[in-house]
Image (spheres, coloured by chain):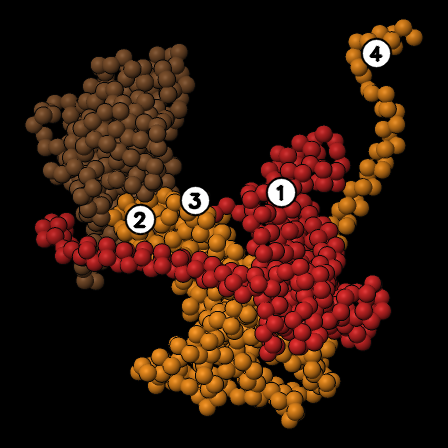
Chain colours: A orange, B brown, C red
């Protein structure tokens, strides 16, 4: 008895509840598998969501896929009234507005990214970067509203009339087509506003990738007597090549799927291919947005969902391409010594 | 016979209690027998101070770098060796908070003045960095970089000069079939010799080498050291190194830096066999590293 | 064969240094103009919304439901605001915990395994799916079979969008926690789940809150997913079930109402729409700035 007391005096030993710790151990061992199982389930739910989405879209589009066949992709006009379900006009509008957006956004984004990485003090870069990030946070509908109340009148009343007085007015693609309605609500306007919606994403990714260029390599460039621009485009951009391509794909994906702003600004010309950038048109996303609620016939709903499926597949392809290109950058920089 | 081997320089510093043998310096080292004052000076540094923000890193550095000689800059880590030579080509200008005061006279003009044309300065003073840094392009384009940038050359002229630079860098035979491979497909030592070829292709007068072999294996190091000895006849070389045996093997003159000051400067043979300053002797013999 | 003396006896022609410097300068100027232009656009948008919407924000705006009479001057967006809060709230309730756990899976359990890599890539792809397609999806599974719109369908669509965002953000934040902390926790003999939730998440708390807030705020501004799910309604939400309830019928929400009202030809309705837009901008930008200020450890520019 006394030895035990001595022991207790010499060292605290196990705390009083030690005897109860043993059964607790059993419960502990359950907690982990449950936690791990839950987490894994949620992870798999992500994958399941994707497949679920694809399956539901295909299922609902099936009547149109089988009923309309390839006519969806070969017919121009979308005119449910005439039982015509052609997506070409929408595809053309999607494509054209995206091209306009990318032509404006990509050079602008690159030059801003270069500025943020190489030309300014880090604290200035932080402020400018945050401001551009805020642009990404502005919801699409607000771009649409400002677009339609401010940009559209500007283009319609000032820009297009001026443009028509210049020799550019005869360039095919700019010259107004038969559907011309003043040029305010047009592919061009939608493209311009889209450009500022995708700009922040391309800038952010490009900036991240350009930052990965090792400082030594840049110093070696300057050491050879290169100007800042020469180092940027001969060395930095070449190094960050894949990443920049990835960034562009990300921007592309976003521009293709953008709905609300485009719906406000591109017009609702579903029945003909645009002949000019200043003609109104439509895009797949805005076509769905504008006509889905009023779709009455089953085949129309199904055809709209088929359009959605097409858009979905296009954006998935671009997303995957973006992932592939961005992964190349990681491998290239990670693999280097 | 030198007591320590080429590939184990650290042993030198760790054997502080054992009296290490004197470093053997090859007999054909110039510097010992010549008239220093009579030699043409490539770069004359007068009272160079250097600041990282508010902290001063270099104090009143004064030194003459002689034409067509190899000047080694040695000293413990953080003593300012790299900082010093980075002032010569003003590469420090990339960083806003780094400033230099004083005079660095090159070709009659003060390099530190705001009138200096940095592009031309860097054409004439080339730099090799510690980490081999080939550009993300082919071997050929790497060497041609400086040529294309500073000169107008036709195709064959360009090719000839690239080949010449690669030959003079003792790497031609190894890469002549790989001219269109990416620069970073070469081994570390080859990459560094590629960087040297890149630098000399642009016809500089001076080569600044900032610990060029510290990231290279011993075989590659030996090749680069041979190269330095061969290049000396055409270029002025300033070599920063933490490897004292390398300085002893390769240089004509040596400057010993400590805490931002030049403690001693003189012919390599003298510095390594009979230094004037106690600090120099302590460093050479490995009392501190 | 060229010899050294041949090449170096006649120095080659030099390229113009002034030309090179001029190009450099032009690019630098363009870069600055570009950056300022980008910022100016952002400032301009905010300015316009404030200018046009400030007048609409009075007490009535926040207390009265949407007007149905086109001639009256009254009415507000109160029901729409409440609706958005409800729809977004329910979406967050679903997506934040699930997304968080999914992120935990990616960062702590799956890591670089094949399954986790696949999940990660799929999550990235899902993040790029246009929100209108998500709306169509929610329509197909929650509206069509039940034959009525519902606020819940809207929540489901928003939750679908939030899920991968939350998961990837969680993963990124958790990956920033140094391994030493993980190992110290486990070395004490604590269970994995305790270490993860108690220790690691505490360390990453700021980032996680930032991520969750930004995810919520991002979907709060979405319109497209609600177009065919929650639709909109001119009335207050009346409870949970029944034609006016959250699960039973269309629910008024801010974004769709703004969309409808801005497209109308009535100036008063348009003004209300701008007011709604201002509310959204304040909420979205305000939360963004607030969260960055409070938890600056997020992205470093």
**Residue beneath disc 1:** C206
The answer for which chain carries disc 3 is A
State whether residue B33 is above or below residue C138: above
Q: Nearer the viewer, residue B71 or A159?
A: A159
> Are marks 3 and 4 in one subunit?
yes
Q: Residue at x 65, y 51 (%)?
A: C212
- Counting labels gives 4
**Residue beneath disc 2:** A221
Q: Nearer the viewer, mark 3 or mark 4?
A: 3
Distance of label 3 from label 2 (alpha carbons): 25 Å
* Label 4–label 1 contact, CB within 8 A: no
Q: Nearer the viewer, mark 4 or mark 1?
A: 1
> Are marks 3 and 2 in one subunit?
yes
State whether residue A147 is above or below residue B266: below
Lower sequence index among marks 3 and 2: 3
Distance of label 3 from label 1 (alpha carbons): 22 Å
**Residue beneath disc 4:** A8
Instruction: Give the secondary structure at mark 1.
Output: helix
C18 to the left or right of C266: left
Instruction: Give the secondary structure at mark 3.
Output: helix
Q: Residues within 10 Å of mark 1 (few under 14, many from 20)?
A: some
Q: Is residue A51 visible?
A: no
Q: Residue at x 65, y 81 (%)?
A: A291
């Amino acid at each position: 008895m006394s030895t035990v007391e001595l022991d207790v005096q010499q060292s605290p030993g196990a705390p009083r509840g030690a005897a109860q710790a043993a059964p607790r151990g059993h419960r502990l061992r359950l907690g982990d598998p449950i936690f791990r199982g839950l987490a894994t389930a949620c992870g798999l739910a992500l994958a399941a969501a994707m497949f679920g989405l694809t399956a539901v879209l295909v299922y609902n589009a099936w009547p149109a896929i089988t009923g309309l066949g390839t006519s969806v992709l070969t017919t121009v006009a979308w005119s449910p009234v005439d039982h015509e379900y052609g997506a070409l006009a929408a595809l053309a509008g999607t494509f054209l507005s995206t091209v306009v957006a990318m032509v404006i956004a990509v050079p602008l984004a690159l030059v801003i990214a270069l500025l943020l990485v190489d030309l300014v003090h880090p604290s200035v870069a932080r402020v400018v970067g945050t401001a551009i990030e805020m642009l990404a946070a502005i919801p699409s509908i607000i771009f649409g509203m400002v677009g339609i109340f401010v940009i559209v009148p500007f283009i319609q009343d000032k820009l297009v009339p001026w443009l028509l007085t210049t020799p550019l007015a005869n360039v095919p693609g700019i010259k107004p087509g038969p559907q011309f309605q003043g040029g305010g609500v047009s592919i061009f306007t939608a493209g311009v506003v889209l450009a500022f919606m995708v700009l922040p994403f391309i800038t952010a990714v490009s900036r991240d990738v350009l930052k990965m260029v090792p400082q030594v390599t840049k110093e070696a460039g300057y050491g050879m007597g290169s100007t800042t621009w020469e180092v940027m485009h001969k060395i930095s951009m070449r190094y960050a090549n894949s990443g920049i391509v990835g960034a562009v794909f990300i921007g592309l994906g976003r521009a293709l799927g953008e709905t609300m702003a485009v719906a406000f600004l591109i017009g609702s010309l579903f029945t003909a291919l645009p002949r000019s950038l200043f003609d109104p048109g439509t895009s797949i996303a805005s076509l769905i947005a504008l006509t889905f609620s009023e779709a009455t016939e089953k085949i129309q709903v199904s055809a709209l969902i088929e359009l959605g499926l097409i858009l979905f597949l296009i954006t998935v392809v671009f997303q995957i391409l973006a992932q592939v290109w961005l992964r190349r950058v990681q491998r290239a920089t990670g693999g280097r010594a | 016979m030198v007591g320590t081997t080429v590939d184990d320089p650290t042993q030198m510093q760790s054997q502080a209690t054992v009296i290490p043998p004197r470093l053997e310096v090859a007999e054909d080292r110039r510097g010992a027998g010549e008239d220093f004052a009579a030699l043409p000076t490539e770069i004359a540094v007068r009272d160079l101070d250097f600041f990282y923000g508010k902290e001063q890193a270099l104090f009143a550095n004064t030194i003459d770098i002689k034409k067509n000689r190899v000047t080694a800059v040695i000293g413990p880590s953080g003593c300012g060796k790299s900082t010093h030579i980075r002032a010569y080509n003003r590469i420090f200008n990339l960083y806003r908070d780094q400033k230099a005061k004083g005079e660095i006279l090159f070709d009659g003009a003060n390099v530190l003045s705001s009138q200096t044309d940095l592009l031309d300065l860097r054409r004439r003073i080339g730099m090799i960095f510690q980490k081999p840094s080939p550009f993300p392009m082919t071997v050929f384009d790497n060497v041609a970089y400086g040529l294309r940038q500073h000169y107008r050359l036709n195709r064959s002229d360009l090719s000839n000069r690239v080949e010449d630079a690669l030959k003079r860098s003792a790497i031609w035979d190894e890469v002549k079939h790989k001219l269109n491979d990416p620069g970073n497909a070469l081994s570390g030592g080859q990459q560094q010799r590629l960087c040297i070829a890149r630098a000399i292709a642009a016809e500089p007068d001076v080569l600044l080498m900032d610990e060029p072999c510290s990231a290279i294996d011993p075989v590659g190091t030996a090749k680069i050291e041979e190269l330095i000895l061969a290049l000396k006849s055409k270029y002025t070389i300033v070599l920063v190194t933490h490897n004292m045996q390398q300085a002893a093997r390769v240089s004509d003159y040596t400057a010993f830096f400590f805490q931002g000051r030049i403690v001693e400067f003189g012919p390599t043979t003298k510095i390594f066999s009979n230094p004037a300053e106690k600090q120099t002797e302590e460093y050479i013999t490995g009392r501190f590293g | 064969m060229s010899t050294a003396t041949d090449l170096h006896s006649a120095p080659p022609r030099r390229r113009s240094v002034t030309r090179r410097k001029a190009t450099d300068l032009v690019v630098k100027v363009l870069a600055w103009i570009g950056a300022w232009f980008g910022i100016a656009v952002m400032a301009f948008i905010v300015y316009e919304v404030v200018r046009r919407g400030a007048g609409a924000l009075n007490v009535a705006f926040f207390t009265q439901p949407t007007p149905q009479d086109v001639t009256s001057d009254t009415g507000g967006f109160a029901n729409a605001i409440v609706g958005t809060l409800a729809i977004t709230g329910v979406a967050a309730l679903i997506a934040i915990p699930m997304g968080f756990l999914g992120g935990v899976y990616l960062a702590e359990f799956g890591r670089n395994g094949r399954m986790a890599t696949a999940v990660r890539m799929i999550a990235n792809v899902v993040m790029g799916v246009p929100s209108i397609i998500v709306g169509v999806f929610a329509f197909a599974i929650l509206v069509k079979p039940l034959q009525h719109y519902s606020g819940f369908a809207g929540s489901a669509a928003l939750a679908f969008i939030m899920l991968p965002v939350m998961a990837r953000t969680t993963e990124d934040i958790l990956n920033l926690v140094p391994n030493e902390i993980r190992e110290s926790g486990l070395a004490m003999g604590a269970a994995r789940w305790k270490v993860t939730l108690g220790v690691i998440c505490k360390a990453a708390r700021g980032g996680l809150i930032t991520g969750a807030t930004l995810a919520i705020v991002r979907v709060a501004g979405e319109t497209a997913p609600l177009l065919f799910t929650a639709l909109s309604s001119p009335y207050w939400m009346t409870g949970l079930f029944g034609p006016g309830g959250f699960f039973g019928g269309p629910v008024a929400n801010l974004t769709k109402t703004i969309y409808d009202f801005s497209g109308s030809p009535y100036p008063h309705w348009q003004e209300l729409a701008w007011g709604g837009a201002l509310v959204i901008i304040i909420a979205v930008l305000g939360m963004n700035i607030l969260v960055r200020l409070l938890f600056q450890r997020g992205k470093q520019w």
